[in-house]
Image (spheres, rainbow, N blue to C red):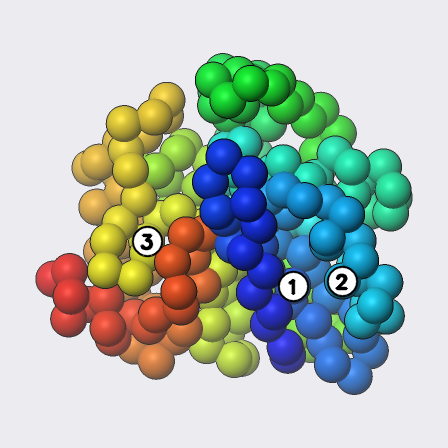
Amino acid sequence: MFVKTVPLEDVLVTNTYFYIDEETKHGFLIDPAAEPKKLLDIIRDEGWTIEKMLITHGHFDHIGAVGVLHERLGIPYYAHQAAQDYLSKPKLNLSAYCGRDISLTEASFFQDDDEIYLEANPSAKLKVIHTPGHTADSVLFYDVANHLAFVGDTIFKGSIGATHFPGGDFQQLKQSLLQKVFSLPEETVLYSGHSEATTIRQEKNQLL
C-alpha cells in the first residue's frame, strides 16, 4: 500500500491522504480538506480510481472538498454514525465561523470496529476505531497489515487534539488515547491532520 500526503490550504493547512493499492491503482481518499481541483488533478494524473472518501471527523477543515468530489466523481463518502450533525450543521462543523456554510447530507455511516475494504483488492482494508474526545465522531483508520493509522485530530506529533469545540471532551480524549491509540503496536505510523507523521513509540515517550 502507498500513502500520499497532500497538505491543502484553506483557513488552515490540513493533511489529506491518498491510501492507494499500487497493483490495482484503486484506493481511498481520507479527509478531503480543500482545493478540490488539486485533488482531481492528482487523481487524473496518477490514473487512480478512488472508491470511497473516508472522514476522520466532521470539522470543516477535513471536509471542505467532499461535496465537489462527490458530485464530480460520483463516489460516496463515509463517516462515523455520530457525524451526521457535524456534517450537516455549519455551526457544529465550524464552517459558519469561517465565512461559509458547509452542509453535507448524503453521507454513509460506519461504526466502531467496522472494516472498510477496497473492492478491487479486499486484502487492502482499514479498521475503524472510534476515538471520541476532539469531537464526538472522531475515528482513526488502522491498517493492521502495514501498521499505519490515519488519526485525524486525535493526536499529532508531540501533542493531542483540542477539546474546546462543540462535542469535545478532554476526559474522553484521554481515554481514547490510553485505551485505543496507545494500544496499537509501537511501530505503527500515525498520519494526522496537522503535523508530520510520527509513531506510537515516539508519542508514548513524548506524552506519557
Residue 4 % position (x, y): 61, 69
User: Label 3: how many residues lie within 10 Å, few (<14), some (14-19) or many (20+)?
Assistant: many
Residue 65 % position (x, y): 68, 40
The Cα–Cα distance between marks 2 and 3, rounded to whole angstroms, is 27 Å
- Which label's residue is closer to the chain start, 1 or 2? 1
Q: Nearer the viewer, residue 197 or 28?
A: 197
Q: Quadrant location of residue 127?
A: bottom right
Q: Amino acid at mark 1?
A: Phe
Above or below, comparing residue 62 to residue 45 in the picture: above
Image quadrant occupied by the C terminus: bottom left
Question: Which secondary structure lies at badge 3?
Answer: strand
Of discs 1 and 2, which sits in the foreground? 2
Above or below, comparing residue 199 to residue 105 in the picture: below
- Which label's residue is closer to the chain start, 2 or 3? 2
**Tag 2–tag 3 contact (CB < 8 Å):** no
Question: Which secondary structure lies at badge 2?
Answer: helix
Q: Residue at x 64, y 47 (%)?
A: 32
Q: Amino acid at mark 3?
A: Ile
**Which residue does the numbered mark 2 point to in the structure image?**
42
**Which residue does the numbered mark 3 point to in the structure image?**
155
Of discs 2 and 3, which sits in the foreground? 2
Question: Which secondary structure lies at badge 1?
Answer: strand
Q: Residue at x 30, y 44 (%)?
A: 161
Residue 88 % position (x, y): 62, 21
User: Label 2: how many residues lie within 10 Å, few (<14), some (14-19) or many (20+)?
Assistant: some
